[in-house]
Amino acid sequence: MSEISATARQYLLAFADDEHLMGQRHAEWIGAAPFLEADLAFASIGQDELGHAADLYALLVGDEDEAIDRLAFRRPVEEYRSCWLVEYETGDWAETMVRHWFYDAAEQLRWQLLAGSSLRPAADLVERALREESYHRRHGDALLDVLLAVDESRRRIDYAVTTMYPLALGMFDPIEGEALLVAEGFVAESWSGQLGRWRELVATRFPGVDLAAIDHGSVAAEQGNRTNRHPDFEVVYGRIREVMKDDPQAVW
């Protein structure tokens, strides 16, 4: 396993935890989505995101399944570095669709930053991840094209944009030491510096929403650069650990 600096570890951990929690959130719609195609698609997308999380965790602890599972499921709550957007609990389909699109638009930018990484194992993950993300983006865009063409569903989607957008800004909270990671060639540019590009993508995708009217900074400021958990985190954390708690010594 390649030697990774403490700063790079925090960068990868934040990315991996976001992928993990987003995958878990997608999986919650299995059997609950409003129509079968969405049910199947969200299951597939969730599986991809969990796979990305496992790959990123493996960069930190190696390829052994036990070590990856320990990092994914057995850490104290305060050691997670996911953003509040993926921790947020919602049963609203419009919010779920908007989060799906917001997150995947940002994720594409995130993988691109690692394409030429000086950490070769990280760079090696990018091509497959971006190929899978292109499917995720097509899925999100195809559904939104249908929903935004109908007045009632467009109103619901646009309202979800206004509620989720300030929370989504917290995805771009800077990782301490990002400038050093850029200088070392670990990433092409800073992650926090991608916010402007993401804003442009959002404005193009949701032209019916006046982003300037709601762009007053992140409501996730209290996430403390990802060191504080959203109140909803405890719910999903307990849910994903249910089987493990039944038999902590089980070997799968």
Image (cartoon, helix red, strand yellow):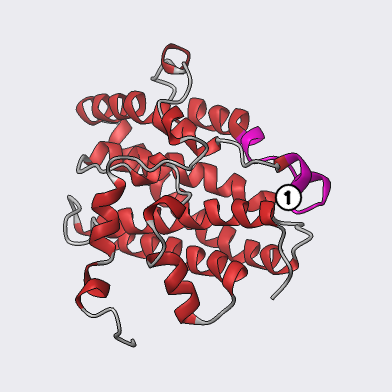
**In the image, what residue occupies the spot 59% across and 66% down?**
128
Three-letter code, disc 1: Val
Label 1 sits on residue = 187
Residue at the bottom extreme? Answer: 251
Q: How many marks?
A: 1
Question: Where is the C terminus found, in terms of image quarters?
Answer: bottom left
Q: Choose top left, top right, bottom left or bottom right for residue 32.
A: bottom left
Give yes or no for residue 181 being in the magenta stretch.
Answer: yes
Residue 194 lies, with reference to residue 22, above or below; the image says above
**In the image, what residue occupies the spot 44% across and 60% down?**
49
Residue 1 lies, with reference to residue 223, above or below; the image says below
Residue 14 lies, with reference to residue 165, above or below; the image says below
- Residue range highlighted in magenta: 179-194
**Closer-to-camera residue (112/7):** 7
Coordinates of residue 250 in the picture (x, y in percent): 29, 85
Q: Is residue 136 left or right of residue 32?
A: right
Classify 10 Å Cα crowding around label 1: few (below 14), some (14-19), many (20 and above): many
Q: Choose top left, top right, bottom left or bottom right for residue 94.
A: top left
Q: Is residue 12 left or right of residue 22?
A: right
Coordinates of residue 186 in the picture (x, y in percent): 75, 54
Question: Where is the N terminus found, in terms of image quarters?
Answer: bottom right
Residue at the top extreme? Answer: 213
Coordinates of residue 223 in the picture (x, y in percent): 44, 36
Coordinates of residue 21 in the picture (x, y in percent): 38, 54
Tag 1's secondary structure? loop
**Closer-to-camera residue (248/133):** 248
Give yes or no for residue 251 being in the magenta stretch.
Answer: no
**In the image, what residue occupies the spot 31% across and 63% down?**
43
